[in-house]
Image (cartoon, helix red, strand yellow):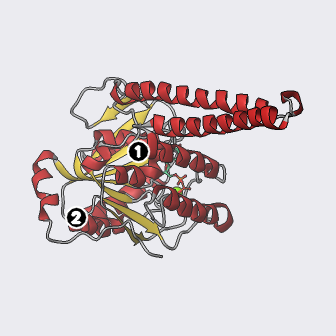
Amino acid sequence: MSFPNLQVVKSTSPSNSAPLASAYPVDLSVVIPIYNEEENIPHLYQALTAALEKIGKTYEIILVDDGSTDGSYAALCRLADLDKRVKVIQFRRNFGQTAAMVAGFDHAQGRVIIPMDGDLQNDPNDIPLLLQKIEEGYDVVSGWRKNRQDKALLRKFPSRIANWLIGKVTGVKLHDYGCSLKAYRAEILKGTRLYGEMHRFIPALANLMGARITEVPVTHHARKFGKSKYGLKRTLKVLLDLLTVKFLSDYSTKPIYFFGGVGVMLCAGGVLAGGVTFYDKYVKGVWVHKNPLLLIAVFLFSLGINFILMGLLAEIIIRTYHEAQAKPIYWVREMRNFEEALSGGSRSGLNG
Ligand code: UDP
Ligand code: MG
């Protein structure tokens, strides 16, 4: 498979990392959403710290408890007490993986942000591979679970189709959108706004910002403890999210082009059908009541006008959409090892 969208970055652009270094207190932020992963947490911490120590950069590990109902939060608190580089956020209820990741991104202080799963399916030893690509000048490095350890029919097959389709529609061809293990330059993430289950589309949204994107094969392990939180149901959501991403990427700043375009075409169809009605009556002597074309003309024309008006409304709405104060998509109950005081929800808001 070829990658027309993945640019090769020449090593003659050293400016990418240098000027930002001072703006970020730490080098790496690892962000991990946790939903009922009690048994995985101690193993995760051990594997992760071992891998991060080897890299030799400063780091923080942000663990976001997404409303777990088992002992996950207590386990996270134990880690936070032991290690000040472990920072914990607890949601008031389950807000979903995307919200948990966004909470971590919002509070991350690292120059490079690395999300991963909390179930040990991703391998922390792959982090250096991702960082190497960042050093080469890429803004987004996506993990590719080349040898994915999940059920073939229920998980791998739908995901293959989804990846192909997302690549086609968004123009960013990655083998594995669904892999959580990725690396982002912080400023790229701060520019994206995620809703629903949109985290898998970050590379596509980053692409809208002009990010340089690449992928590297990473190791994937089968789940040892706990259960997967997803099933086949996710596929439909992915398709609907894709529709949103496509619409936002093409028309979020100019909806009148979409609605207006459809509207004008419908009106043109209406005018045509009306013209034929007149022609039939005055040239061929066929009266309107023997001919469905008049109805079709009225229908198409009023539908067309409605589309155009909807486009104008959408133009007003997107102005609010882009300019209004961002509303939170989650509320934090408690935070550990953060300097700032807690005040309800945090930033979030628009997409794209
Ligand atoms: N997760 C979460 N909130 C949810 C569902 C999942 O924070 O509502 C976390 C989960 O704890 C794990 C990661 O998201 O760390 C990925 O979930 P899972 O392993 O179930 O997904 P899969 O690997 O099966 O796609
Ligand atoms: Mg998993």
Name the residue nearer the viewer: 254 or 25: 254
Q: Does the rendering let one see residue 41? A: yes
Residue at 24% x, 63% y is 53
Confirm or reject: label 1 Cβ below 8 Å from ligand 1. Answer: yes
SS of the residue at dot 2? loop
- The Cα–Cα distance between marks 2 and 1, rounded to whole angstroms, is 24 Å
Q: Is residue 328 left or right of residue 37?
A: left
Check the image and name the residue furthest to the bottom. Answer: 1
Looking at the image, is mark 2 or mark 1 earlier in the sequence?
A: 1
Q: Place residue 109 in its image quadrant.
A: top left
Residue 71 position, x and y percent, is 49, 42
Q: In the rendered structure, find residue 334 and report the number of the disc placed on it.
A: none
Residue 302 position, x and y percent, is 66, 27
Q: Which residue is mark 1?
A: 101
Give the amino acid type for the residue marked by disc 1 in the picture: Met
Check the image and name the residue furthest to the front. Answer: 283
Category of crowding for the residue at label 2, using alpha-carbon neighbours closer than 10 angstroms: few (below 14), some (14–19), many (at least 20): many
Rendered-image quadrant of the C terminus: top left
Q: Is residue 292 left or right of residue 141?
A: right
- Vertical order, 145 against 82 (above or below): below
Residue 47 position, x and y percent, is 36, 62
Q: Which residue is mark 2?
A: 137
Confirm or reject: label 2 Cβ below 8 Å from ligand 1. Answer: no
Residue 304 position, x and y percent, is 61, 32
Q: Place residue 310 in its image quadrant.
A: top right
- Vertical order, 135 against 335 (above or below): below
SS of the residue at dot 1? helix
- Vertical order, 26 against 283 (above or below): below
Q: Place residue 307 in its image quadrant.
A: top right
Residue at 86% x, 29% y is 287
